[in-house]
């Protein structure tokens, strides 16, 4: 289990892009460091998350090859004062800096809030599952992740 509290203060005039990017980088690097050599972790996980009319598929591979493929149809330009483009930027920055391969795909839905919430919940669910210690092996034919 992991609990984190983030206090992000922008010293420049409000810029949601840099705050979100910095938080994603910090969380990603913290995860990568916490996993160490990744010995014993399950490595792969996926979740299909419903949130009212929205249905989101999230799949991860803790591979040390950080990348994100995010396929969400978000209609609004902003939500809660945050530019929608920064949702994508968060996932990309987090995946790159944590070294995970991340796929998020919208299977159904139209409500931007529900789609985003289900995406983040799915990421949390898959991280919880994929980081579970199940033995003492490294899940790679190269014996390194």
Image (cartoon, rainbow, N blue to C red):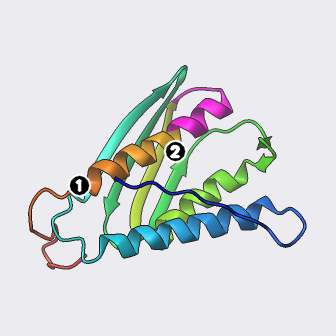
Q: Which mark is residue 120?
A: 2
Q: Quadrant of residue 101?
A: bottom left
Please name whichever residue, 34 or 91, is drawn nearer the observer in this view of the structure. Answer: 34
Q: Distance between the Cα atoms at labels 2 and 1?
A: 19 Å
Of discs 2 and 1, which sits in the foreground? Answer: 1
- Above/below status of 12 relative to 17: below
Q: Quadrant of residue 23?
A: bottom right
Residue 12 within the magenta-colored segment of the rendering: no
- Above/below status of 135 relative to 54: below
Rendered location of residue 8, percent (x, y): 70, 63
Residue drawn at x 43%, y 52% as measured from the top left: 103
Rendered location of residue 9, percent (x, y): 76, 65
The answer to whether residue 60 is left or right of residue 141 is right
Label 1: which secondary element:
loop
Rendered location of residue 50, percent (x, y): 46, 26
Residue 32 seen by the camera: yes
| Residue under pointer 1 | 132
Please report the bounds of the magenta region as a residue range. 108-118
Specify the quadrant that holds the C terminus.
bottom left
Residue 117 within the magenta-colored segment of the rendering: yes
Please name whichever residue, 3 or 54, is drawn nearer the observer in this view of the structure. Answer: 3
Does the magenta stretch mainly form a helix, a strand or a loop? helix
The answer to whether residue 21 is left or right of residue 18 is left
Rendered location of residue 133, percent (x, y): 18, 58
Q: Residues within 10 Å of mark 2 (few under 14, many from 20)?
A: some
Residue 99 seen by the camera: no
Residue drawn at x 58%, y 64% as measured from the top left: 24
Q: Are marks 2 and 1 in contact (CB under 8 Å)?
A: no
Q: How many marks?
A: 2
The answer to whether residue 141 is left or right of residue 55 is left
């Amino acid at each position: 289990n992991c609990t984190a509290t983030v206090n992000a203060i922008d010293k420049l005039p409000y810029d949601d892009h840099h705050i979100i990017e910095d938080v994603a980088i910090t969380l990603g690097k913290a995860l990568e460091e916490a996993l160490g050599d990744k010995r014993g972790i399950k490595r792969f996980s996926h979740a299909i998350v419903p949130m009212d009319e929205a249905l989101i598929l999230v799949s991860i591979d803790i591979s040390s090859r950080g990348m994100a493929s995010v396929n969400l149809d978000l209609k609004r330009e902003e939500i809660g004062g945050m530019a929608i483009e920064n949702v994508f930027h968060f996932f990309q920055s987090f995946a790159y800096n944590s070294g995970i391969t991340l796929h998020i795909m919208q299977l159904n839905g139209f409500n931007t809030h529900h789609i985003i919430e289900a995406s983040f919940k799915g990421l949390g669910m898959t991280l919880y599952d994929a980081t579970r210690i199940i033995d003492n092996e490294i899940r790679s034919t190269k014996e390194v992740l």
